[in-house]
Amino acid sequence: MRALKTILIILGVLIALAIIIGATGSPAFHYERSVTIAAPVDVVYPHVSSLGALDKWSPWNEKDPAMKKSLEGVDGTVGAVAKWEGNDDVGTGEQRIDSLVPNKLMRTHLTFHDWAMESTAGIALSENGDSTRVTWFMEGQNEGMSGFFRKVMGVFIDMDARLGKDFETGLGQLKTLAEEDAMKEKEATAKLLAAYTIETGDRPAALYVGLRKTIKWADMKQFFTEAFATTGAALKAAKVKPAGAPAGVYFKWDEVNHEADLLAGFPIAADAKGKVTGVTEYETPASAAYWIQYKGGYNSMGPAHEALSAKIEMDGKEHHTNVIEEYVTDPGSTPDSTQWQTNIIYLTK
């Protein structure tokens, strides 16, 4: 009887302790792990900015390779939902994208159906030179009866260590993927730069006259034809001679809407300022510059622009104000487009 009484007393103490813990324990929980990845933030971000990308390095795929998955909405946008149904190790639940801050943060809402639990999860990115610090976190509130029992269980089970181990596994897999991409990007950039001779120096201010317009990429050929003809007529009427080859002076290149804000026309001498009417007059500032003497067709200049941008970034410089294309070769007199020379110039700080 004495042994039974002792057991009952101990059991009573444990029950009382559990009630106290459940009633007074912290209602909030927060778990996180971090890793430093040897890759720029813009290489890491695509690996965390969609539910599909997260799944590629998820540590829970190995725990249930037969897990059933589905996706609702447009992945990579706020509101998209990934659902899963698996074994006892992964359970059943869903994850919804709640916010996306490019190159900084992805935040999601998690629902674990088996455990009647909801939480916020996120991947935070912090740029550190050529590396990126990545923090994976989960946080929420222990509420209701399920929260009561989770607080009690938290005394006997180290959830931070248990979940933290999964986080560390996932972040390790993310690190491998991102660093492989960074290496491939470096190799591609080196190959691109080797294809061109990039020169640097100081460029004086230059005065241009022509037509300026924001125009769709598809309409650029027609715009250049009209702009050169109109500007040429205006120069002739003003008895002003061009001071160089016809040119395109770019103010903006819109990759989203496929538009460009540009002036197409001719350079003129500084003493001709204000003499040509009916066109736009613009002066590019005196500046340091990077340039390529490109040979080839106009539709194939993309890689040369990419090489200049990569070199400027690599040198820690910053492009500003204008990109200038000087069309040195007259296509009318040289039909072979592989022989066309275009000077591509980026003004830099």
Image (cartoon, rainbow, N blue to C red):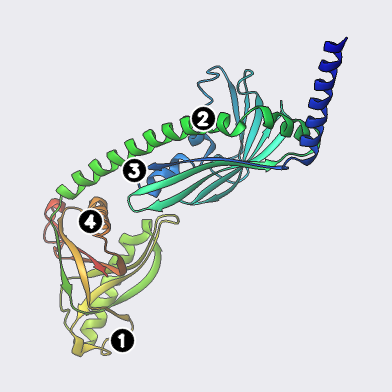
How far apart are the two marked residues, 1 and 2, measured between alpha carbons? Answer: 72 Å
How far apart are the two marked residues, 2 and 3, measured between alpha carbons? Answer: 21 Å
Badge 1 is on which residue? Answer: 277
| Position of the N terminus by quadrant | top right
Under mark 3, the amino acid is Ala
Asked whether residue 276 is in view, the answer is: yes
CB contact under 8 Å: marks 2 and 3: no
Under mark 4, the amino acid is Lys
How far apart are the two marked residues, 3 and 1, measured between alpha carbons? Answer: 55 Å
Of discs 4 and 2, which sits in the foreground?
Answer: 2
In the image, residue 304 sits, relative to residue 202, either above or below, namely above
Kind of element beneath mark 4 = helix
Say the numbered circle drawn on residue 136: none
Say the numbered circle drawn on residue 38: 3
Q: Is residue 225 left or right of residue 49?
A: left
Q: Is residue 85 left or right of residue 335?
A: right
Kind of element beneath mark 2 = helix
Under mark 1, the amino acid is Thr
Find residue 205 and report its horizontal and vertical position in percent: 22, 79
CB contact under 8 Å: marks 3 and 1: no
How far apart are the two marked residues, 4 and 3, measured between alpha carbons? Answer: 20 Å
Badge 2 is on which residue? Answer: 165
In the image, residue 272 sits, relative to residue 330, either above or below, namely below
How far apart are the two marked residues, 4 and 2, measured between alpha carbons? Answer: 41 Å
Under mark 2, the amino acid is Lys
Say the numbered circle drawn on residue 311: 4
Q: Is residue 107 left or right of residue 12?
A: left
Instruction: Give the total number of marks visible in the rendering.
Output: 4
Of discs 1 and 2, which sits in the foreground?
Answer: 2
Return the disc, 1 or 2, that comes first in the chain's sequence. 2
